[in-house]
Amino acid sequence: MALELGRRVAVVGVGCTPFGELYEKSAEDLLCDAVDEALADAGCERERIEAAWVGSVLSPFGGDALADALKLFGRPITRVQNYCASGMDAFRNACLAVAAGMHDVVLAVGFEKMRDGGFARPNRSHPVVDFGERAPHVFALSANRYFNRYGAGKKTLAAVAVKNHRHGRLSPKAHLRMDVSEETVLQAPMVYSPLGLFDCCPTTDGAAAALICRADIARSFRGAPVRPLGIGLAVVSGQPYYRPSFGYVGFEATVRAAEQAYAQAGIGPDAVDFAEVHDCFTITEILTYEDLGFCRRGEGGRFVEEGRASLGGEKPVNPSGGLKSYGHPIGATGVRMIYELVTQLRGQAGERQVQGARVGLAHNLGGPGAVACVSILGG
């Protein structure tokens, strides 16, 4: 909080590749495409980058993945791996380095090749993950508990999928640009009850980048600056589903990360105009409404069913289409959310523009609910 991010740091360039099944593109291609777009957006030469952080979960490479692709040698480049929060954690580290006065111009990048590179790399050091548990299973437990406690049902989940696909159709770079009906969602093949195919986000290829600089030099770049107001990161137990105290209908990591971000920004949930949240499954978005304080416990289902989370509603959530429609290349997702926030806050989002957007929030939830990162940006 003492670093006062909003006074010290600015985002002056963002870039994002199309998301999808990008078999014709290598990981290096995706990295270069995203970074080149961010540099062009900022009007910045590559040589001005003093340091970089790159988020990836599946790549076996460290910082050299970015150094070799961009020919950025002889400067600090750090690979960040923090489950699905890897990209946003890379952004967090980049912002903190500038705020601390270590660097003037830095880069945050996230990337992943999931469609032709595979993603089932066992983590035999973890006591739960990869020993029989998979994401659809653990989030299905949360969905069933939520149904039982609050009286929601499959149609409540379907409202999230229908909304996010409707939004994603307006996003030129989204993976699944198509409308889906409630009937389509409800009749889709079951993955893990009650989660069907359209309750789950796709596996995706893609990359995104953000150029960050000292706030006092931001006007020397072409891109309209956007200010990071607060960035919270919280890590809790790596196996929350097996703790007797775990309630299944919320994630402590999200609550704690949000508390940090709100405190740093000096605002509360009511000041957030729109949000990009981690809808890896439809139930996750509903729980996140409540964890972030957008509505009270048990009201998340009504929040989406009543259109309050839709474009034109009181607090649009996932105007990009979210992970559900835009796609989820794990390491890239957090930086892609920053790309969306910056685009919206600049008023450049076209058909999906949130009118009057001044404050945006981005949220990642990683692993078995073990880590969350929340970023708040202001125009």
Image: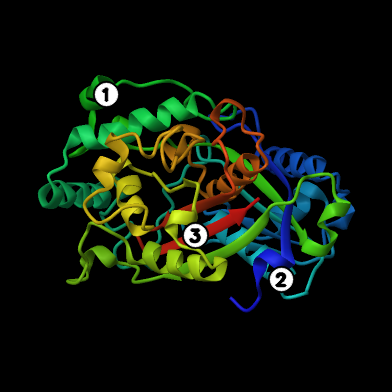
Q: Is residue 336 above or below residue 106?
A: above
Q: Which residue is mark 2?
A: 99
Decide which of 259, 354 is in the foreground and name it: 354
Tell me if 270 is positioned left or right of 230 in this view.
left
Q: Amino acid at mark 1?
A: Glu
Residue positioned 16% across, 42% down in the render: 152
Residue positioned 51% across, 52% down in the render: 362
Q: Amino acid at mark 2?
A: Ala
- Note whether residue 283 is visible: yes
Label annotation for residue 374? 3
SS at mark 1 in the image: helix
Decide which of 39, 220 is in the foreground and name it: 220
Residue positioned 31% across, 46% down in the render: 286
Residue 8 horizontal/vertical position (percent)? 73, 68
Q: Residue furthest bottom?
A: 2
**How far separated are the C-alphas under marks 2 and 3?**
17 Å
Judge the density around disc 2: few (<14), some (14-19), many (≥20) Cα neighbours within 10 Å. many
Judge the density around disc 1: few (<14), some (14-19), many (≥20) Cα neighbours within 10 Å. some
**How far separated are the C-alphas under marks 3 and 1?**
30 Å
First of labels 1, 2 by sequence position: 2
Tell me if 195 is positioned left or right of 111 in this view.
left
Q: Is residue 371 above or below residue 113?
A: below
SS at mark 3 in the image: strand
Dividing the image into 4 quarters, which one contains the N terminus?
bottom right
The answer to which image quadrant residue 241 occupies is bottom left
First of labels 3, 1 by sequence position: 1
Q: Which residue is mark 1?
A: 182
